[in-house]
Amino acid sequence: MSDALQTLADHLATKSAAVVLGSEIAFGELTVTVGLGQISSFVAFLKTDPGCKFTTLVDITAVDHPDRVQRFEVNYHFLSMYRNHRLCVVLGTSEDDMVPSLVTLHPGANWLEREVFDMFGILFSGH
């Protein structure tokens, strides 16, 4: 499975070189880090690219790191049923940043983004 994940990581790094800040394979899952301003375009790419087809948004959550400048990490978990892959996309944000909403790409994000707001106070545009 790690060969397939490495192939996916290489594909993402090649096709989205300006967006992907880093990637890591651990515990049988690929995690990709992107910048705050690129999350919407990157998720659209993940959903439509024939090599990805991450059409299912499984979850959105966040982690609070009070000692960091970018205090929060927002974690998006995707599933590609077509490729049988899971992907975690991570972005860092501070308390003052507004995170772009994914509702136009994944309508189910509405509830998940509201839950993250209730838990951490992270603001998503469009809410």
Image (spheres, helix red, strand yellow):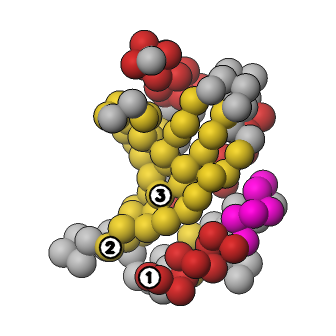
Distance from label 1 to label 3 (Cα)?
13 Å
- What amino acid type is highlighted by mark number 3? Asn
- What amino acid type is highlighted by mark number 1? Phe
- What amino acid type is highlighted by mark number 2? Asp
How far from the left and from the top, in percent, is residue 106? Answer: 76, 56
Circle 2 Cα neighbour tier, 10 Å, few/some/many (<14 / 14–19 / ≥20): some
Residue at image mark 2: 64
From the viewer's perspective, is residue 79 above or below residue 69? above
Image quadrant in which the C terminus is located: bottom right
Q: Which residue is the extreme one toward the left?
A: 67
SS for tag 2? strand
Between residues 62 and 67, which one lies in front from this camera angle?
62
* Comes first in the chain, label 1 or label 3: 3
How far from the left and from the top, in percent, is residue 76? Answer: 54, 54
Between residues 79 and 113, which one lies in front from this camera angle?
79
106 within the magenta span: yes
107 within the magenta span: yes
Q: Are marks 2 and 1 in contact (CB under 8 Å)?
A: yes
Taking the image as shown, residue 29 lies to the left or right of residue 104, namely left
Name the residue: 73% across, 26% down: 82
Q: How many marks?
A: 3
Q: Is residue 39 visible?
A: no
Magenta part of the chain? 105-110
SS for tag 1? helix
Distance from label 2 to label 1 (Cα)?
8 Å
* Comes first in the chain, label 2 or label 1: 2
